[in-house]
Each structure stands twice: as structure tokens, then as C-alpha cells.
Image (spheres, rainbow, N blue to C red):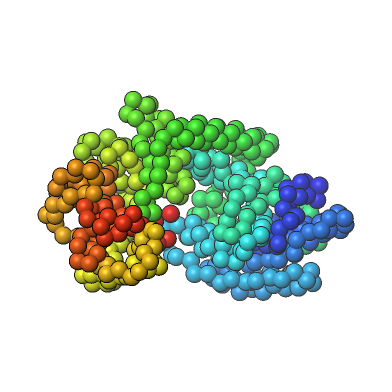
């Protein structure tokens, strides 16, 4: 076990802490013991400080006893153990809700430079693969449990993922380790327990090498998924991208590109915003947003995110109410142009370059029916709506942009439209809006 473990953790010996997720079950107890004894086998190597975290889900009558067991287990090893109590939502999937609460606790506990060690093994990998297969997962889901990934401010590592359950049990018995058993792990009402106790044993009886063969299949699936990511990244590099007021946008791939390829590009682009669509959502997304009429401004809500299309661009925005600076400030906001004007929930307004003397600047809510003349040479008076269209300002952003007056004269609409007379009042200075972090869906 030590020989298999060290290559998995050797790249993380420069971490600040190794934090073991300690449930009290045999898997996590063995992982803690292995990491604790590692320095004895490699005395010339300096290892990070070893710690443990126990998450008490408060779902079982014995939950308090398991917490006490984990804390007592760590004492003779001189390993700090922090216990965290969480509240699990009693929703449709107790398993999923408990997992979500557990990982939230892990994230909150980790600091920069920490590596969270979890004791998932080869059998867990096979179980996850079959579970997701039965749920109709795609390549990302069938790639199953990742060996390592980022989590919060730290990194998550599963160093026992290539080890069998039997090897873990053999180590525990060889070193006379104690552990606790969660009785809910035998409840066949839960899908994973059914796979673990009813399905996988039958498969292994017929195909003894099933776990390792499933591991091979997962490797092939991961390669295919990685290849699709590489192809999508190459396609994305050829498409215009940008960000306006904290809202990222992507020029949609042309309609003459095969839909499967376009879908792969969009999937990869949305990955960075943690937006994952189901098959049903993809069909609706294509029908309602991608294939909508050219002059439409469709939107598609996914959780807390709202995907919008405007003039051939896909925008990733917040599904919550758009920020309105005047909800806080009333009908007008006064400013002297010095420094930055911070508008809570909206962002920061600046004037670049900064004026040498204070100015009389007033920001007011946009009015309907305005007809204005920009500062472009030979510009004619136009409705503000048309000016917005020519400047590619999406409709949902327009109401956020304040009318900006200097000495009572209208000189700009936000930082997107500069009007005739601005040069006389501001010279070469221009307004700039920097959206606040919570203004962006990312």
C-alpha cells in the first residue's frame, strides 16, 4: 500500500497541510494511518503537516459517537482533528444533499496550499461509473471520480483511487486498526448501496477483474472527453469573445457549422461558468435561443444564470434582477468627478483622465423618447434607442446606463455614448464604468 500511495502524493509534498476527510469508516481510517506512517518509510523527505476534518451530518443517532471516535483516533497520533456539524436538506436525494453539505464544509475549512485527501478507492470508482451510466450521463459524468481537482482555496486528491477495497481491509487488519460502520451503508433503498451490495458482487462473480476493467473504460472515456475539450478550445480561439459590464459574451458559431460541433464549442465555453445543461435543456436551448429569429432577443435561464442572445452574440448574465443604481440613490446622483464614484450593487464610475478641478456632475435615470446627437463628426440627431443599437448595447443593459450631465448639460449615456458638447465640458476625458464583482454571473 505504501508503495502505491507515495507516487500519488509525491507531487504534493510542498503543500502547507494534508487534510484527511475522516468519516471514521475503514477507508478513511486506513488513509490516515498510511499518511501518518509515510515519513517512517521515506525519512529523507519533508512531508506537510497532517490534519483531519470530520463532518458530522447529524443524520444518525450515533453521529456524535462517530465524531468522538474520529477525534479520539487522532489524539495518539498527535494529529489535529476538527469536527464540523452540518445541516443536510431533507430533499429529494438525501445522499446528494449530504454530499453537497460535506463538500461545502471541506471548502470552508481549506486555506491556500492545503490538499484535501479523500479515501475513495477502485470499488467506489466502479460504483460511480455504473450509477452515472444508469442515469444516462455523458462523457463528463462517465469519467467518474477525478483523481485530483481544485476545491475552494485548496486542492482535492484521492490517492487510493487505484487501490482495491480488499487491499484496504487487509491493511486495516494487518495493523489492527479500528473503525466504525455506518448502518445506512447497508440500506438498499439508496441507489449506490444497491449497486454496491447487489449489482457489483454479481458482476465480479462473473468477471473477477471487473473493477480494473471499468477503470480502463473510464480512462478511455476521459481521453475522449479531453480530446473534445482540445477541439472545442481550438474552435473557441477563432471566435470573438469579450466582456461588457461584467457580462461575458461569445460570438455564436455560424449556422453552417454542424450542430454537434457547435454544441461542443458552447459546452466548453459554458464550462468556465459552471453552467451544465441536460439533454432536455440542450434541446430547449437550441430551439428557444440558437434557432430563434434573427431580430429576437431570446433568453434561457439555467439555475442562477441567464443565457441571452443579441446580434449574434451569446451573453452569460445573472438570472437575478439587473442592478439599478437609482434604487439606492433615488432619481439622481451628484458627483464632482474626483476619484471614483462607488455605487453599491452597480459598480464604480471613473473619469479618465481625472479632472484637475471639481466638476458639477449629475447622474440621472434614463428617460424614454430621447433624441440625441453623438460627438461623431457630422452626426445627426437620432433616437437614443437607435444609437444604442448602432453601439451594440444589448436591451437589458440600456436601463442600467445613467444619463450623465455636466453643468446641467447632457454629455454622455453611461460610458457607451458620448454626446455633442462633451468635448467642451470634459475635453478628452471619458467616463468608465467598472462593474462590481457581484454584478457578474461569474
Q: Camera-side residue: 194 or 395?
A: 395
Identity of the residue drawn at 30% across and 68% down: 359
Q: Is residue 252 visible?
A: yes
User: Which residue is outermost to the left?
Assistant: 369
The part of the image, by quadrant, that contains residue 63 is: bottom right
Q: Camera-side residue: 37 or 185?
A: 37
- Image location of residue 288, percent across then percent down: 27, 40
Identity of the residue drawn at 65% across and 52% down: 157
Q: Is residue 228 visible?
A: no
- Image location of residue 105, percent across then percent down: 56, 65
Query: In the displayed structure, does residue 45 sit left or right of residue 68?
Result: right
Screen quadrant of the C terminus: bottom left
Q: How many marks?
A: 0
Query: In the displayed structure, does residue 215 sit left or right of residue 355?
Result: right
The part of the image, by quadrant, that contains residue 386 is: top left
Identity of the residue drawn at 59% across and 53% down: 150
- Residue 99 against residue 256 in the figure, above or below: below
- Image location of residue 426, percent across then percent down: 30, 59
Identity of the residue drawn at 63% across and 61% down: 112
- Image location of residue 92, percent across then percent down: 41, 58
- Residue 14 against residue 361 in the figure, above or below: above
Q: Camera-side residue: 203 or 414?
A: 414
Query: In the displayed structure, does residue 192 sit left or right of residue 16?
Result: left
Amino acid at each position: 500500500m505504501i508503495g502505491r500511495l507515495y507516487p500519488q502524493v509525491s507531487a504534493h509534498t510542498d503543500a502547507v497541510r494534508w487534510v484527511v476527510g475522516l468519516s471514521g469508516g475503514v477507508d478513511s481510517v486506513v488513509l490516515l494511518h498510511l499518511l501518518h506512517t509515510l515519513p517512517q518509510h521515506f525519512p529523507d523527505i519533508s512531508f506537510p503537516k497532517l490534519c483531519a476534518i470530520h463532518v458530522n451530518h447529524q443524520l444518525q443517532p450515533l453521529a456524535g459517537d462517530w465524531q468522538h471516535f474520529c477525534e479520539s483516533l487522532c489524539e495518539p497520533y498527535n494529529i489535529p482533528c476538527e469536527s464540523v456539524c452540518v445541516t443536510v436538506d431533507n430533499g429529494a436525494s438525501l445522499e446528494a444533499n449530504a454530499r453537497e453539505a460535506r463538500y461545502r464544509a471541506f471548502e470552508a475549512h481549506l486555506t491556500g496550499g492545503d490538499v484535501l485527501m479523500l479515501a475513495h478507492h477502485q470499488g467506489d470508482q466502479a460504483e460511480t461509473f455504473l450509477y452515472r451510466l444508469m442515469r444516462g450521463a455523458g462523457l463528463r459524468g462517465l469519467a467518474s471520480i477525478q483523481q485530483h481537482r481544485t476545491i475552494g482555496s485548496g486542492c482535492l486528491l484521492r490517492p487510493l483511487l487505484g487501490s482495491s477495497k480488499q487491499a484496504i481491509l487487509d491493511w486495516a487488519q494487518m495493523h489492527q486498526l479500528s473503525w466504525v460502520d455506518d448502518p445506512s451503508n447497508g440500506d438498499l433503498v439508496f441507489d449506490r448501496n444497491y449497486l454496491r451490495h447487489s449489482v457489483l458482487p454479481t458482476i465480479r462473480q462473473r468477471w473477477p477483474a471487473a473493477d480494473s476493467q471499468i477503470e480502463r473504460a473510464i480512462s478511455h472515456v476521459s481521453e475522449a472527453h479531453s480530446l473534445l475539450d482540445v477541439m472545442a478550445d481550438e474552435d473557441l480561439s477563432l471566435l470573438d469573445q469579450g466582456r461588457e459590464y461584467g457580462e461575458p459574451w461569445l460570438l455564436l458559431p455560424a449556422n453552417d457549422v454542424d450542430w454537434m460541433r457547435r454544441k461542443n464549442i458552447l459546452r466548453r465555453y459554458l464550462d468556465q461558468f459552471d453552467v451544465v445543461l441536460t439533454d432536455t435543456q440542450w434541446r430547449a436551448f437550441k430551439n428557444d435561443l440558437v434557432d430563434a429569429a434573427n431580430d429576437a432577443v431570446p433568453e434561457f435561464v439555467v439555475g442562477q444564470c441567464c443565457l441571452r442572445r443579441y446580434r449574434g452574440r451569446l451573453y452569460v448574465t445573472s438570472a437575478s434582477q439587473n442592478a439599478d443604481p437609482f434604487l439606492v440613490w433615488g432619481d439622481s446622483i451628484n458627483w464632482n468627478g474626483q476619484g471614483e464614484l462607488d455605487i453599491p450593487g452597480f459598480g464604480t464610475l471613473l473619469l479618465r483622465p481625472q479632472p484637475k478641478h471639481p466638476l458639477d456632475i449629475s447622474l440621472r435615470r434614463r428617460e424614454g423618447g430621447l433624441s440625441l446627437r453623438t460627438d461623431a463628426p457630422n452626426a445627426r440627431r437620432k433616437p437614443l434607442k437607435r444609437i444604442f443599437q448602432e453601439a451594440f448595447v444589448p436591451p437589458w443593459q440600456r436601463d442600467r446606463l445613467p444619463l450623465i450631465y455636466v453643468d446641467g448639460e447632457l454629455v454622455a449615456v453611461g460610458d457607451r455614448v458620448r454626446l455633442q458638447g462633451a468635448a467642451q465640458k470634459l475635453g478628452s476625458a471619458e467616463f468608465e464604468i467598472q462593474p462590481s464583482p457581484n454584478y457578474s454571473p461569474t
